[in-house]
Image (tube, rainbow, N blue to C red):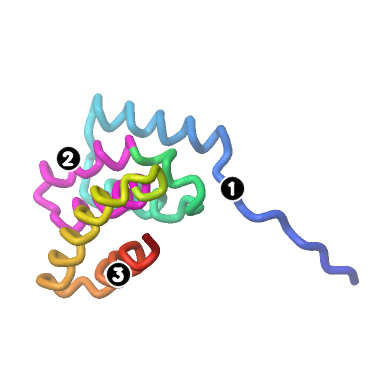
Amino acid sequence: MAVTAQAPVRTTDVEEHAFADVLTGLREHGPATAFELAALIATMETVPQAEVRRVAATAVVVERLAVGLGRPDLEMRARLIRADALQRDGDTVESGRLSQQVQVWAADNGDDHLLARSHNLLGSG
């Protein structure tokens, strides 16, 4: 039986529009729960690195919503997505500043996963 290589999963125009729809829904209604916001962030974190810019605007809104829900963990996760997009757009100063904020918060709050992700982003600039 022959094994065929599969094309890498890429964010499609449909997914880009889906993020835009989610963003519109968040602006109009807000998330019903922190769980829904966390699920959205998890989806945003899995966007291929080369296409992270597509979720940058959503990350800004999600970050604000997380503040409103009193969830600094979700706020920091969204902030790191934003920092990644900024780095890819060449704004390494602002990206580094945001990544360091996330790194300090993660260290202070024992969030090892977010700490590792912030180290990774800071090391890739």
Label 2 neighbour load within 10 Å: few <14, some 14-19, many 20+: some
Which of 121 and 28 lies nearest the eye of the viewer? 121
Q: Which mark is residue 115?
A: none
Q: Is residue 3 left or right of residue 105?
A: right
Q: Is residue 45 left or right of residue 75?
A: right
Magenta span contains residue 101: no
Residue occupied by mark 3: 119
Q: Residue at x 59, y 48 (%)?
A: 10
Which of 102 and 40 lies nearest the eye of the viewer? 102
Inspect the image, locate mark 3, and give the three-letter code of the amino acid beneath it. His
Residue occupied by mark 1: 10
Inspect the image, locate mark 2, and give the three-letter code of the amino acid beneath it. Arg
The residue segment tinted magenta is 57-86
In the picture, which quadrant includes the N terminus?
Answer: bottom right
The percent position of residue 38, horizontal first and vertical second, equals 29, 52
Pointer 2 or 1: first along the chain: 1
The percent position of residue 4, horizontal first and vertical second, equals 82, 63
| Distance between mark 1 and mark 3 Cα atoms | 25 Å
Secondary structure under the numbered disc 1 in the rendered image: loop
| Distance between mark 3 and mark 2 Cα atoms | 23 Å
Pointer 1 or 3: first along the chain: 1
Secondary structure under the numbered disc 2 in the rendered image: helix
Residue 76 placement: quadrant? bottom left
Identify the residue at the far right of this view: 1
Whether residues under marks 2 and 1 lie with C-beta atoms below 8 angstroms apart, the answer is no
Q: Closer to the observer: label 3 or label 2?
A: 3
